[in-house]
Image (cartoon, helix red, strand yellow):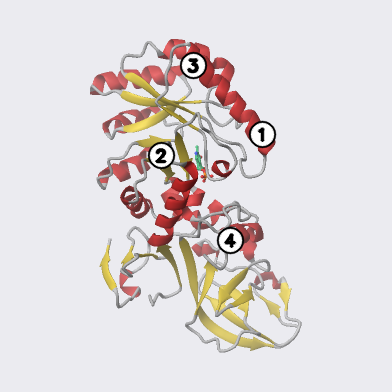
Amino acid sequence: MVSYPRSCVFIDDLAFKNNLTEIKKIIGLKKSLALVVKADAYGHGLEHISKLAVDSGVDWLMVATVSEGIALRKIGIELPILVLSPIIDDEISEALIYDLRLVADDLNFMVRLDHQAHLLKKKALVHIKIDTGLSRYGIMPCQIKDFISNVKNFQNITIEGIATHFIDSAKRDDLSKKQIQAFNSAIHVSKVEGIHYKYIHLSNTSSILKYSDDDYNLVRIGAAAYGIDYQNAYQGRISPVLTWKARILSIRKRPAGSGVSYESTYTTQKETTIATLGVGYGDGYPRSLGNTAYVYMKGYKAPVIGLICMDQALIDITDIPDVHVGDDVELLGKNVRPYELSVFAGLNPRELAIGITSRVPRVTLAPDHSVRILDNFHYQKSSIKNETLISSL
Ligand SMILES: Cc1ncc(COP(=O)(O)O)c(C=O)c1O
């Protein structure tokens, strides 16, 4: 048992590895697996998760920013890394120095990239981004012919791949099918123009369960690797990697008719035992969970009552026996699943872990039961205690 002061995040290394194993079974041996580790590996810890991914045989890592890519190179990761978002000119030279692959959709950018690559005596590796409907980034399929004819002339750029991204592969099959068609037409035109892409990629967490993308050979997975499922589409094959717990700091009984928390949005119907948790929206526990969510403890679901405060949340433990100050509850994890909690919060399930703030300690649990406390967060490492603690990063 790890002791922590208020709330704490636990990263289950084995669950992560098992999820990757399941994902590999689904995508098969012919495709390369890219783990999307942007936004601090969806809030699970960029460096820690990326190292585990390397050990687990992931082929690529994908980030959103040049800084994330550099952080990975600085801890010695040599896998191919693709920066998924557009970058600004100031970042080009660092991206090249650290061998980060880039996505591109703009000829002027390519001119500047080619020039910088020439100065640094580097070959820039680029994946052309096709906009098949998201209107976020990328060239339209009808522009691909022109784009390619211009791009062929750059001496210091290799077009390594082509990619697009789904609008809503979890729910909008109608849109996804149109996107696949548009993407295929861009690939076809490229072939006619004599361009051969080493990597073709589109698939993500929801799409790999639905579409056999035999023509594509690289798969970009984020949510599923972290055990974030939509409406149990994975049917138990993946499980949440992150568990967020909070401790009970205080317990009291209040008579029927008592208002609870700011703005008195909840009133007790009978005498109620209320526990105060050491977590609030200042820790990233969304305010929208007030009066909607539950926490899990001792096999029971305890409803969250009243509005979430900055530093505390209140739960009704009237019907749960034998609860004491210092007990801990699960806020998010295997018993309070990300999708379920995201529905209560009115959020995307990816947002929950990403939103956990830096004052919450992150502790990793390895299969050999060793425990590590991750750095870079605003808490005193000495406040977290564990008998099996062997090292801290
Ligand atoms: C460009 C791109 N590819 C892949 C992914 C991974 O998607 P998922 O988390 O659904 O696996 C994301 C996630 O936001 C993304 O932005």
**Residue at the (63%, 72%) spot, across then down:** 304
Q: Amino acid at mark 1?
A: Leu
According to the image, label 3 marks what residue? Answer: 190
**Quarter residue 151 falls in:** top left
Is the CB of mark 2 within 8 Å of ligand 1?
Answer: no
Neighbourhood count class around disc 1 (C-alpha, 10 Å): few under 14, some 14–19, many 20 upward: some
Front disc: 3 or 2: 3
Badge 4 or badge 1: first in the primary sequence: 1
Task: Say which of 366 and 257 sits in front.
Answer: 366
According to the image, label 2 marks what residue? Answer: 65
Front disc: 1 or 2: 1
Can you say whether 243 is above or below 186 in the image? below
Query: What percent of the width, then of the height, locates residue 28?
Result: 45, 41
Neighbourhood count class around disc 2 (C-alpha, 10 Å): few under 14, some 14–19, many 20 upward: many
According to the image, label 4 marks what residue? Answer: 286
Asked which secondary structure carries label 3, the reply is helix
